[in-house]
Amino acid sequence: MLHTPSSTNFEIVHRTSSALDHLAGPWSQSIAEQVPFPHSDFLERPSAWMHVIGLILANPISSNNNIRVVLENVKDWRDAAFVGSPNFLAADAVCLLKKLTLPLWDRDDYRRFTSLLDCRLSVKLMKHEPAVTPEFVNLLAALPEQFRTKKIVGFLLNTAEGNLINQLFKTRTKADVTSVKNALESCPDRQHFWRKVTDHFFSEIGTLPVGPVINDDRFQPIQTIRDLEKTGLRFRNCMKQFSVNMINNELGFLVFSGSEDAVISYQPRIDRGFVVDEILGPENQAVSEETIEEIRTVLTAHGFAFSDTDPGSLYQKIDLQLSRLGREDRPDCAFKIASKALEKVDLLNR
């Protein structure tokens, strides 16, 4: 049985030209209602005027009839802009309408654009853009206000990255955000930029997982990311890059203060034991055999194993050397690799 739709369900479709469909985007029907075909009073106006009309249509408290009112009674688009948004009361922001790209934007993009007009940094950035796109506006809107600077925005490629920056630092204090902003603005390229983002994000993590308490005041555990950073600076090494490993319970560090200072790295095992991987001094230099023996004596008494005697560690190193041999065609290099593997096999067989 056929059902004839009620007359109240009919939608009037206004005739539109291809030019209007192209320039007016989502607002072509609304504009055609107020400016009938051939839409000359819209199409013959500059782009700033077109965006004023788009803003009026996007304003939830504005009537579509306002389009006809401003077209017939307002000569200058600068004056008409205030009908679209009161945020244009900042006179120096009205000129931005000339920079907005066509076709007309959707309601959410216009809303974000007008919300940025109250932000001095955003207005400044948009003024210096050759053209202001919805994508650029959405990127600015995603960022916290303090990060809306030319240098920082220049490193970001999309809105998702802006949202990511916002989520990473939204709970930080104003002083922390300023510190992060200054660090990011000093970056020479995107690689350094995201490295700094990583460093600052992890720097605020609280207490890290640590191994057993060592009953010897010469051994101090690294317990926070800040401890890790400070120790890395003190020993002039790259410890800071292992922050995620520490968070994941994959690695731990002890700082030894004796006749020689040293950093001790250790790894947890599934049997809840710990294996010392490396003992190194400043700038990753080797320490004396006396210092190693001193450290070994104390840590062995606390249940630590050492990679030069731990079977699991030896198997891991043998596997690495054998894998390298399969990729090495130079006889002299292959000899060195095989010799190292042989040393580990000998230790394993003792």
Image (cartoon, grey):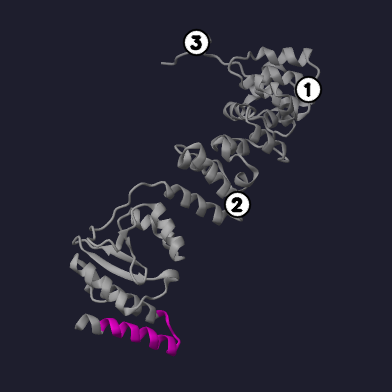
Which mark, residue 6? 3
Residue type highlighted by circle 3: Ser
Q: Earlier in the sequence, mark 1 or mark 3?
A: 3
Between residue 102 and residue 60, name the one nearer to us.
60
In this view, the residue farthest toward the front is 259
Q: Give the x, y percent position of residue 274.
A: 24, 64
Q: Is residue 132 highlighted in magenta?
A: no
At 67% across and 16% down in the image, what residue appears? Answer: 33
At 68% across and 20% down in the image, what residue appears? Answer: 31
Between residue 108 and residue 277, name the one nearer to us.
277
Residue topped by disc 2: 186
Characterize the magenta stretch by its predominant secondary structure: helix
Structural crowding at the residue carrying mark 3, measured as other residues with C-alpha within 10 Å and reported as few (<14), some (14–19) or many (≥20) = few
Quadrant of res 52: top right
Q: Earlier in the sequence, mark 2 or mark 3?
A: 3
Structural crowding at the residue carrying mark 1, measured as other residues with C-alpha within 10 Å and reported as few (<14), some (14–19) or many (≥20) = few
Which segment did they paint magenta? Answer: 327-345
At 38% across and 78% down in the image, what residue appears? Answer: 324
Q: CA distance from mark 1 to mark 3?
A: 34 Å
Q: Earlier in the sequence, mark 1 or mark 2?
A: 1
Q: Nearer the viewer, mark 1 or mark 3?
A: 1
Q: Going by the image, does 156 lie left or right of 229?
A: right
Residue type highlighted by circle 2: Ser
Q: Is residue 337 highlighted in magenta?
A: yes
26 relative to 10, above or below: below
Residue type highlighted by circle 1: Ser
Q: Give the x, y percent position of residue 193.
A: 55, 52
Between residue 8 and residue 57, name the one nearer to us.
57
Q: Give the x, y percent position of residue 148.
A: 60, 39
Residue topped by disc 1: 40
